[in-house]
Image (spheres, helix red, strand yellow):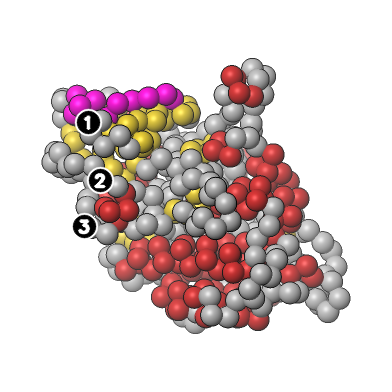
Amino acid sequence: MGAQQSHANGGAGSGGCPCFVLSPPFKNGGGDLLGSPIPDTPRGPQDRRSSKYIGLEKEVESQRKLKANNRHIKTQDTLDMAESQYQAPIHEGADAEVALYDKYQLMEVLGVGSTSTCHRCVDKETGIHYACKIIDKQVIEDRFQGMMEQFHTEIEALRNLQHPNIIQLLDVYITEEKIFIVMELMEGGELFDYVVQKGTLTEDEAASIVRKVTSALVYMHSKNIVHRDLKPENLLLRRVPNNDKEPVEIKIIDFGLSKCMQEPVARSFLGTRGYLAPEMLQRRDYTKAVDTWALGVIVFVLLCGCLPFDDDSSTVPSDDLVRSKFVLRFPRWAKNLSQSSKDLLSHLLDTNPARRYTAEQALEHPWVTGKEVKKGNLLASPGRIKKSPALRKAANRTPQSSRVNGKYYPPSRQTQGANHTVSPPQRVMVRKTSI
């Protein structure tokens, strides 16, 4: 879905390179504030074929309940927690909501989604601002099949992940009617929105961003957690840098499709088209290498401003089709890319998962470390991303913080006018297919 060829004939010497406009799938009607996908409830086979949402597989082995942990832990700076063994406590019971209000003061509403409301909240002891998502359990159970399981999956994953480049979970409060999730407040918007609005991006700046994302991926995989839905929309900035010298604080969000792989392989078919590894498209057993494929797609978009491959696969591709479809070529406007960056992409976007780079190998690559980067080499990607139909609205959105913790909100009536609205993002999700 959504991938369109950006030029029919490649530049000189490009061999007719196909490069596809970056059209990340958007979801209609809002979503949860951690960025988790919200599919329509699957109906019959005919309805599934006509629906923009194809549903999600529910992992057989993941049907579990969150275990309460009512420890009252003093909130510290999230970076301090990332260096410790902090695990967000789960408070459950009749007095859980009272415990929430004892610790946090809820402030203004940041946004309202179809399944939850997000508030700014303040730790009464430290004065640090966070985001508090309030989920109505009854709405979830009535309207969204399998959605509660995704919340459980995400909470369990984030409780076990403490890394400077992964969104930090602080507290979870569970009552009979609601779930309250307190997490880092992400006010900087999406990475690619920032790149477009900044207007320029150098190769060494891109390498620095990739290094942070790859570091988080190495850490995640060391915990045997595979994300399975890495894409640009799931890379958020904690805040917008004040100047070019201030480092970009980037975080991976949306662990609703993540999986703790107790076995080295999995088979569930889910994720977002355009970022799915070939072995997943072929419904084959896969490993953590699906994440490094998605990382390769993100790096390609960051450097070139378009998707590397068409994502229109509607059937299970054969081996021959995979070999012909996933041939790595670069658009004519990317001719100044360093050879080292192209070498990295050739290893990340290898169709053979056994040969494909691991996250550890990617982190040690000389382009990622900055040893073989073209210093000051300006990339064409900001302008190319801006020309993408899917991101043109994002480039014109104000304020920058229109996406908070994985959720888009229309600008407020007070600041943008009563009749001004922003189209919410949609997603095309995929589910397991019997073969």
Mark 1 to mark 3: distance in Å? 21 Å
Q: As shown in the figure, which amino acid type bears the numbered disc 1?
A: Lys
Of residue 351 and residue 155, the one placed in the foreground of this image is 155
Circle 3 sits in a helix, a strand or a loop, which is it?
loop
Tell me where the magenta segment starts and ends, as one range.
Answer: 98-109
Magenta-colored stretch includes residue 104: yes
Q: Is residue 60 visible?
A: no
Q: Is residue 369 above or below residue 257?
A: below
Mark 2 to mark 3: distance in Å? 13 Å
Name the residue: 34% across, 58% down. Answer: 163
Estimate how packed mark 3 is, as few (under 14), some (14 to 19) or many (20 or more) residues with alpha carbons within 10 Å: few
Say which residue label 2 marks.
76
Q: Which residue in the rendered view is the most extreme toward the left? A: 71
Give percent across and percent down for residue 89. Answer: 20, 43
Tags 1 and 2 in contact by the CB under 8 Å rule?
no
**Dot in front, 2 or 3:** 2
